[in-house]
Structures are given as structure tokens and as C-alpha cells.
Image (cartoon, rainbow, N blue to C red):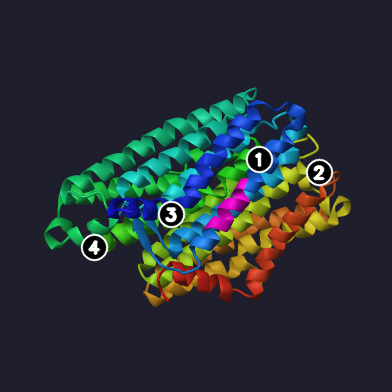
Amino acid sequence: MSTLDSALSADLLTVWPEIILALGLCLVLVVDMFLKDSYRDVTYLLTIFLLAGIAWSLLGAGAGGETTLAFGGSYISDPLSRVLKLFAVAAVATVFLYSRPYLRARGLHLGEFYVLGLFALLGILVLASSYSLLVSYLGLELLSLSLYALVAFNRDSPVAAEAAMKYFVLGAIASGILLYGMSLVYGVTGSLNIGDLQATIGTAEASSLSLWVGLAFLVAGIAFKFGAVPFHMWAPDVYQGAPTAVTLFVGTAPKLGALALAIRILVEGLPALGDLWQVMLAALAVLSLVLGNVAAIAQTNLKRMLAYSAIAHVGFILLGFVAGTPEGIQAALFYTLVYVIMAAGSFGFLVVLSSRGEEVENLDDLRGLWQRSPWFALLMVLLMVSMIGVPPLAGFYAKWWILSALLETNHVGLAIAALVASVIGAYYYLRVIRLMLFEDGGQAHAGGVPLDVRVVLSANVLLLLLIGLLPDRLLELCARAAALI
């Protein structure tokens, strides 16, 4: 075998999970074309088996824990990418499991939902391993275009169509801003490779006005994908207007892609400009914490309330970057993983309660849930308590490590602001608990929910308790991904 063939084989081995996913989703698409609506579960099972195969390939690739570069250094396989990919695969599989009864009850159990979800997952995997600005943009567009179509998945809903149009227009603007920032950085450095950017940007280049402007555009594009203030305008409308199953997807796995984009470009590519982007992210974080928590108090729609809650949680994630240390990145990664688990449980809870055909998305719908479905009410109580950040749930440790990273770097004011914002945010979470436990009049209940959905949703919530009681394993995983040990 020639040296060229050997190098190509090594490159293909690095992207083996992505190859499996790309071939598998084509197979799912073709098979689904020949299935009747009554056999749509075949598409679901094929998708779950495909995701299991991807997870198996990722676990096998990560056995050695080494870092490898492929395709001329534009693609990387390292502990960070493998952790993000594994959690993304698990999150998407959970979304598909929760969504099946919901979609079936509305006549929306179509193969397009699974195919678009798999395309979005492919974009997340590409983002996690991108080591070039160009590859990052390709992965981001693959993810974004899939999400636009998913939001408009219910073609008979004018509300969903309006939300998808808003998302598409604002997303296209944000993508253009990000691409323009990448072009300015390339114009100054002459390279798209993230590893080369770190080595190229020196004292002279770091003072370039073009580079500063390019950095501002990059931060704006990343903030939009996170949903941080003031680039959050799409989030409440999209979360509320999309079918709840799609809201579940949008609110979970894409956060991992946004985190990968931020780490690759800012932390690994532009550390020499850390003093600049840390100031920008600090402002975005404080705005997100304040507006997210305050605006959530005024909401009566649960999906819209959780959208503003997500904005506030993004503020915490960005504070990990503001710390500017490996411990801060570890804390941001830990927080993101925990938030994805919490969001999957929270939106999954709404999907499960809506599986009988009636939409459960208003606060009043949850009144008296404890009397009708005590176990599911207890699960939602645990989710809300974890969102607040009360021990021994995982949400407590997520916030604790962010605050610790800030205090270690003397960002005392930001730590106090985050703490105050958390206290304010506790109000709307406690309101949900009060309605479920102490009020009467709602109609929502969990009757008729399939056993597999009940088991996975229970495991989803109890996982937060397990992480809270034994956080060391996940912390160690995040430390390895952040290159601390």
C-alpha cells in the first residue's frame, strides 16, 4: 500500500462515525420511501439501530484517548469531539424515542422527521471535529438547514410556518455575519486551519483592526447559535411555534454543536485575542442571565418559559469561557452536558403529556398533576429543582463549578450577578412546582404513555440525581476533554 493510500485510509478511519451516519441516513431515506404509514415504526427502529452503531464506533475510536488529525489538519478526533458526539447521539436517540407517540397522535409520524434529525446530527458531528473555519461553517449550515425544515415540519400549522420563516431569516443573517468574520480572520492570517490560527496570530496581527472586527462578527455568529442576548430573538418564537417534538430537538442536541463551535474557534483558534472575546462574552452572559430570567417570569406558555430559561442557562455557559482557564472550559462543558440532560427531560415531559393528542404547553395545564399522575409530577419537580441549582441534583454542581471558575480568576462581580440571577430564576421554576402540587383544575395526565417512554424519561431524570450524588465521573470526563489531565 502506498503512502498516499495509507494516509487516505487513516483519514477515512478518523471520520468513520460520520461515514456510518451519512450512509445510514441514506438507507433510512430510501427504505422509508417504500413504507406505508402503518409501518412507519420500521423507520424508527432503523434509526435507533443506526444511532447505536454510531455510538459503538465512537466508543471504539475513543478507547486509546489519542488525538488524530485528518484531511490536511482540517478535521480532528480528540477527547472533546468524542464526548460531544456521544452525548449528541444519545440526545438525538432520546428525542426520537420521546417523539414517536406524540407524532403518531397527530398524523405526523413521517420518515422526514427522522431523516432531518439525522442530517442535523451529522452537522453536530462535523462541528465537534472541525479544525478548520471552512469545515465549521459547513457543519453549522448542515445543522441549521435541517433545523429550519424541522421547525416547519407540521405543514398545516401557520404558527410553525411563521416560526420557521423567522428562524430562517435570522439564521441566514447570522450565518452571513459568521462567514464574514471568518473571511476577515482569513484575510489577516492567511489560513483557515484552527491550529495555524493560534500559531499565526502574533502581537502585530493581534492589534489589527480587521482582526478585531472579524472577531466581533465571529462572536456574534456564535452567540446566535447559542441563543444569547441580544441574538436571542428567534428562540421564544421557535420554541413556542414548532411542534413540541421539534422544540425538544432544537432545545437539546444543537447546544452541543454551538459549544463545539465556540471552543474550536475562540479557545483553540484565537487564544491570543482572549482578552477581547472574554469581555464580549461577559457582556453577552450578563445580558442573557438578566433578560432570560426576568422575561421567563412573565410567560404563561411553558415552551416559551423554557426558551427564556435556556437563554439564562446559556449565560452561565458563556461565563465558563469568560473565566478563560481550562477549569472554566471544563465547567462550561460540564454545564452544557447537564443542561442537555435537563432540557431533554423538561421538553420530553411536555411531549409525553401531549402524546394523547391534546397540546400541553400552558402553565395552567399542569394544575393538579400530582393528583392524576404523581410519578410524572415528581419527575418534573426534580427537573425544576435541578434547573434552579439545588443540591443534590446535577444542576447544583453545574452552577457551582462555573462560579468556582469565576472566583478563581477574580471575576467576583460576574459571580455575584450569576448568583442573583439564579435566585430570580428560582421563582418561575417554583411556580411550576406549586401549580402541580397545590393547585386544581388542570387536565394534563400521563395516561396511555408507552412503557419504553416512561422508563427512559424516568431514567433521564434520575440520571440528574445520580450525577448530583456522584459528579466525579462526569467531571473527570470533562477534564479529559478540556485537556486538564
The Cα–Cα distance between marks 4 and 1, rounded to whole angstroms, is 41 Å
Q: Is label 4 or label 3 in front?
A: 3
Element type at mark 4: helix
- Where residue 372 sits in the image (x, y, percent)? 87, 50
* Quarter the C terminus occupies: bottom left
Element type at mark 1: helix
Q: Are marks 2 and 3 in contact (CB under 8 Å)?
A: no
Amino acid identity at mark 1: Ala
Earlier-in-chain disc, 2 versus 3: 3
Q: Is residue 278 visible?
A: no
Number of residue marks: 4
Q: Which residues are magenta?
A: 50-57
- Vertical position of residue 202 compared to residue 235: above or below: below
The Cα–Cα distance between marks 1 and 3, rounded to whole angstroms, is 34 Å
Q: Report the residue marked by disc 4.
A: 272
Which residue corresponds to the image point at 27% horizontal and 58% vertical from the top-left? 195
Q: Report the residue marked by disc 1.
A: 245
Earlier-in-chain disc, 4 versus 3: 3
Element type at mark 2: loop
Which residue corresponds to the image point at 52% horizontal and 67% vertical from the top-left? 419
Q: Is label 1 or label 3 in front?
A: 3
Q: Are marks 1 and 3 in contact (CB under 8 Å)?
A: no
- Within 10 angstroms of label 4, few (less than 14), some, or many (20 or more) residues? many
Amino acid identity at mark 3: Leu
Number of the label disc, if any, that sits on residue 444 = 2
Earlier-in-chain disc, 1 versus 3: 3
Q: In the rendered view, does 326 fall on the left or right side of 236?
A: left
> Picture quarter containing residue 427?
bottom right
